[in-house]
Image: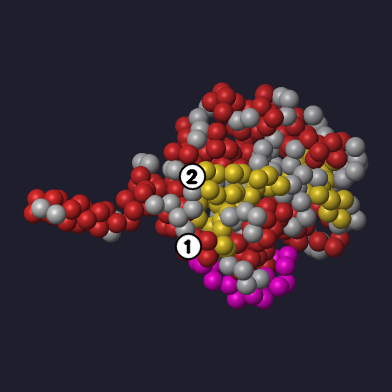
């Protein structure tokens, strides 16, 4: 090699080394895992709208990712997919990270989609026309997206405040779409704990009487006694430690989606979401979006007090959680979101 070529080779090597030392540049060039499977429980729900927006507007692709989203009947089943190894990441409820820490299977949330749960507990006007208080639910059937999911946990929490135990009612998995609507209308359940657009469909038709509504962040704080983080991306801690650049790319896409939603109007949303999400009625979906928008995260950041709020809610209905000594800072991180916000100001 002649002296000029040697100098050029050394300069190129030095330049490459310098780039590798800058975390942001290294992440942009080297995804540890390009193909990522995300498990979600009820993808059509407005609870998961940022995930759908990131997918439909190709924000994942823009980050160099090939994302497959697998839909399940509820968040508990989505979590099972990651525990079983058939998915890498969950798009699900924040409180599952605390449950898994208590079980010795550490999970960490790394980008927030919802700052309030958006879950509504309501009773059937058909089977419970004389409903007066939550105590009237004793011995009744409550429909949830899936047993063990966040809809189940929220219902347990509301029952506990009224002095009822989970064993005082029967929970029935009804999913998060037209099946949930049909189950309530057929009288198969007496009450429902679900999300939009299901709740708005039932409310507009006069099929339900709302008991507790956490679509309003202020109401959510009153119910739970503090900020209650909701939908988020979370994954096994080992996955995040092994694939930090991949996790960063996922967080980037969701942060972009969060920001897009805050600037979007109903007509923008209708154009982007799949037709099947509308459940046959665009007006109802628009109404549901307007009710849910305030509960969606504007930036992807987890509130500092959120983990403690979620722990109190779980501990009130789960003795094992109440006795567990949990690290309430180990189940989430804002590290990836802060980098994403710096990139997408």
Residue 191 pos. (x, y %):
83, 46
Is 124 on the left-hand or right-hand side of 201?
A: right
In x, y percent, where is residue 136? 87, 52
Q: Is residue 304 magenta?
A: no
Give the residue pinned by disc 2. 65
Q: Looking at this view, name the residue that lies furthest to the front.
A: 1
Residue located at (55% from left, 33% from top): 56
Q: How many marks?
A: 2
Work out whether residue 123 can be spotted.
yes
Q: Would residue 221 be visible to someone looking at this image?
A: no
**Position of 287 compared to 181: left or right?**
left
* As drawn, 43 above or below 86: above
Relative to 318, does residue 263 appear above or below in the rendering? above
Label 1 secondary element: helix
Front residue of 143/209: it is 143
Magenta-tinted stretch: 316-330
Residue drawn at the location 50% of the way across and 30% of the way down = 264
Residue 329 is inside the magenta segment: yes
Quarter of the rendering containing residue 171: bottom right
Q: Main secondary structure of the magenta part?
A: loop
How many neighbours does mark 2 have within 10 angstroms: few (below 14), some (14-19), or many (20 or more)? Answer: some
Residue 72 is tagged as none
| Residue furthest left as drawn | 3
Q: Which residue is mark 1?
A: 242
- In front here: 183 or 202? 183
- Alpha-carbon neighbours of circle 1 within 10 Å: few (<14), some, or many (≥20)? few
Q: Are discs 2 and 1 less than 8 Å apart at CB?
A: no
Position of the C terminus, as image quadrant, is top left
């Amino acid at each position: 090699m002649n002296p000029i070529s040697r100098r050029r080779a050394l300069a190129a090597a030095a330049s490459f080394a310098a780039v590798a030392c800058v975390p942001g540049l290294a992440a942009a060039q080297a995804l540890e895992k390009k193909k990522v499977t995300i498990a979600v429980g009820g993808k059509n729900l407005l609870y998961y709208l940022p995930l759908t927006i990131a997918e439909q507007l190709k924000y994942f692709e823009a980050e160099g990712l090939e994302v497959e989203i697998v839909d399940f009947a509820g968040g508990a089943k989505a979590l099972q997919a990651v525990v079983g190894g058939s998915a890498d990441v969950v798009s699900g409820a924040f409180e599952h990270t605390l449950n898994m820490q208590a079980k010795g299977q550490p999970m960490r949330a790394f980008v927030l989609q919802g700052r309030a749960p958006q879950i509504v507990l309501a009773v059937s006007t058909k089977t419970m026309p004389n409903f007066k208080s939550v105590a009237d639910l004793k011995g009744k059937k409550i429909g949830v997206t899936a047993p063990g999911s966040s809809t189940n946990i929220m219902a347990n929490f509301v029952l506990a405040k009224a002095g009822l135990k989970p064993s005082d009612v029967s929970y029935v998995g009804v999913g998060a779409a037209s099946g949930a609507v049909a189950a309530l209308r057929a009288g198969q359940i007496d009450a429902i704990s679900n999300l939009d657009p299901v709740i708005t469909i039932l409310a507009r038709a006069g099929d339900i009487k709302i008991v507790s509504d956490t679509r309003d962040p202020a109401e959510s704080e009153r119910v739970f006694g503090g900020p209650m983080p909701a939908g988020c991306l979370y994954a096994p801690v080992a996955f995040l430690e092994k694939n930090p650049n991949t996790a960063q790319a996922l967080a980037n896409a969701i942060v972009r989606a969060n920001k897009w939603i805050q600037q979007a109007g109903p007509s923008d949303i209708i154009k982007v979401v799949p037709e099947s999400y509308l459940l046959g009625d665009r007006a109802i979906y628009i109404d549901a979006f307007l009710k849910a928008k305030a509960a969606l995260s504007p930036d992807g950041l987890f509130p500092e007090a959120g983990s403690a709020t979620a722990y109190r809610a779980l501990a009130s209905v789960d003795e094992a959680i109440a006795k567990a000594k949990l690290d309430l800072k180990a189940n989430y991180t804002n590290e990836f979101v802060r980098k994403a916000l710096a990139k997408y100001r």
